[in-house]
């Protein structure tokens, strides 16, 4: 009788447990709604998506597929760089029938505002741009770069170097036509190999140390040193104290054609200024004598001679 009573009690309690299961567990309907909310979040307010932009701006959309920015659009689950990342939310622009005043247009704003938009992403790479000579001269990012109509893939430039630079730096172009010059026009060097157009702490945006040597010695390594006996002007005044970096009518890009005259600018007996080393030549400097560097061969510095004989 006791076993029969326990069995009847268990049978009576089973419906209670069975009814409790749906109360404590989420229904399949609720689970589906939760997943849908997670995988399909609502669109951000004011944004219409790149597909909507392409309906009117088909040419720009087609070219954007080959743009380095388009690779970012595929990153982070498709939430990378798109049209509205640069031009801002487009809903008001679309609702206004293409009203240009209701979207950010780089051609309708000032140079500082246009550059500020680019620097929202590129500030880490170009932290000195706002203090650079280009920025101070009201040259913006879009003065040199074009997102939709560039001719170079790497930097999205409007024109190849050096043609792009010559558009403003017209006084530099003739220097590369000198008999002796760095091979920029020939394509062996680029302006950006020596200059950082986005700004440095040096004059002329040089990628260099204060005396101007690092930018030269990365190619002219034989002059880099360090030497036991250094020629002081190399460290104090830099390479440009003797050489014209863009071009010169003189061999070795020298500022003065006569080697002896170049040396005598410093090594001469003058009551106002004399060189730290020899104050003048020890023999006649008439034209029949050879150049100073015929004897002082290691003029940039030497490990054996304090007068740079070897």
Image (cartoon, rainbow, N blue to C red):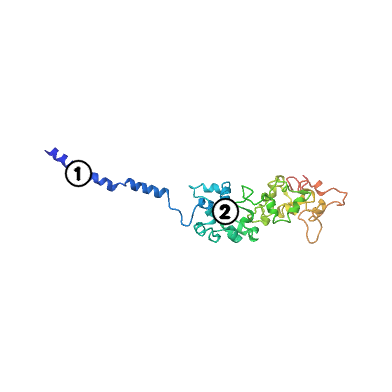
Q: Which residue is mark 2?
A: 122
Instruction: Check contact, mark 1 vs mark 2: CB within 8 A.
Output: no
Confirm whether residue 307 shows in the render.
no
Q: Which residue is mark 1?
A: 13
Q: In the image, what residue occupies the spot 73% across and 53% down?
A: 173
Q: Is residue 266 left or right of residue 167?
A: right
Q: Disc 1 vs disc 2: which is toward the camera? A: 1
The one of 257 and 305 positioned closer to us in this rendering? 257
Quadrant in which the N terminus appears: top left
Q: In the image, what residue occupies the spot 80% across and 50% down?
A: 250
Which callout, 1 or 2, points at the residue further toward the start of the chain? 1
Q: Can you say whether 63 is above or below 270 in the image?
A: above
**Quarter of the rendering containing residue 2:** top left
Q: Is residue 252 left or right of residue 84?
A: right
Residue 151: percent from left, percent from top: 64, 49
Residue 49: percent from left, percent from top: 50, 52
How many marks the image carries: the answer is: 2
The one of 153 and 282 positioned closer to us in this rendering? 153
Residue 74: percent from left, percent from top: 51, 46
- Separation of disc 1 and disc 2 at Cα? 69 Å
The one of 290 and 32 positioned closer to us in this rendering? 32
Quadrant in which the C terminus appears: top right
Secondary structure at numbered mark 1: helix
Residue 46: percent from left, percent from top: 48, 57
């Amino acid at each position: 009788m006791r076993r029969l009573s326990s069995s009847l009690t268990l049978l009576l309690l089973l419906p209670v447990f069975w009814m409790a299961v749906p109360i404590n567990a989420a229904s399949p309907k609720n689970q589906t709604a939760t997943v849908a909310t997670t995988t399909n979040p609502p669109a951000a307010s004011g944004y219409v998506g790149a597909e909507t932009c392409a309906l009117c701006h088909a040419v720009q959309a087609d070219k954007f597929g080959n743009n380095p920015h388009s690779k970012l659009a595929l990153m982070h689950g498709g939430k990378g760089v798109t049209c509205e990342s640069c031009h801002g939310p487009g809903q008001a622009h679309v609702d206004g029938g293409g009203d240009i005043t209701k979207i950010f247009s780089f051609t309708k704003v000032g140079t500082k505002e246009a550059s500020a938009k680019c620097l929202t992403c590129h500030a880490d790479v170009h932290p000195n741009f706002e203090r650079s000579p280009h920025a101070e001269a009201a040259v913006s990012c879009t003065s040199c770069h074009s997102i939709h109509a560039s001719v170079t893939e790497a930097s999205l430039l409007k024109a190849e170097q050096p043609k792009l630079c010559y558009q403003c730096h017209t006084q530099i172009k003739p220097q590369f036509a000198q008999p002796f010059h760095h091979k920029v026009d020939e394509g062996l060097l680029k302006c950006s190999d020596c200059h950082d157009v986005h700004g440095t702490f040096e004059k002329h945006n040089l990628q260099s140390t204060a005396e101007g040597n690092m930018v030269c010695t990365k190619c002219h390594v034989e002059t880099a040193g360090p030497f036991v006996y250094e020629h002081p002007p190399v460290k104090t005044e830099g390479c440009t104290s003797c050489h014209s970096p863009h071009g010169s009518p003189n061999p070795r890009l020298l500022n003065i054609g006569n080697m002896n005259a170049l040396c005598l600018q410093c090594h001469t007996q003058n009551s106002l200024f004399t060189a730290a080393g020899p104050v003048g030549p020890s023999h006649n400097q008439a034209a029949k004598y050879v150049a100073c560097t015929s004897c002082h061969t290691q003029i940039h510095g030497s490990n054996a001679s304090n007068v740079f004989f070897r």
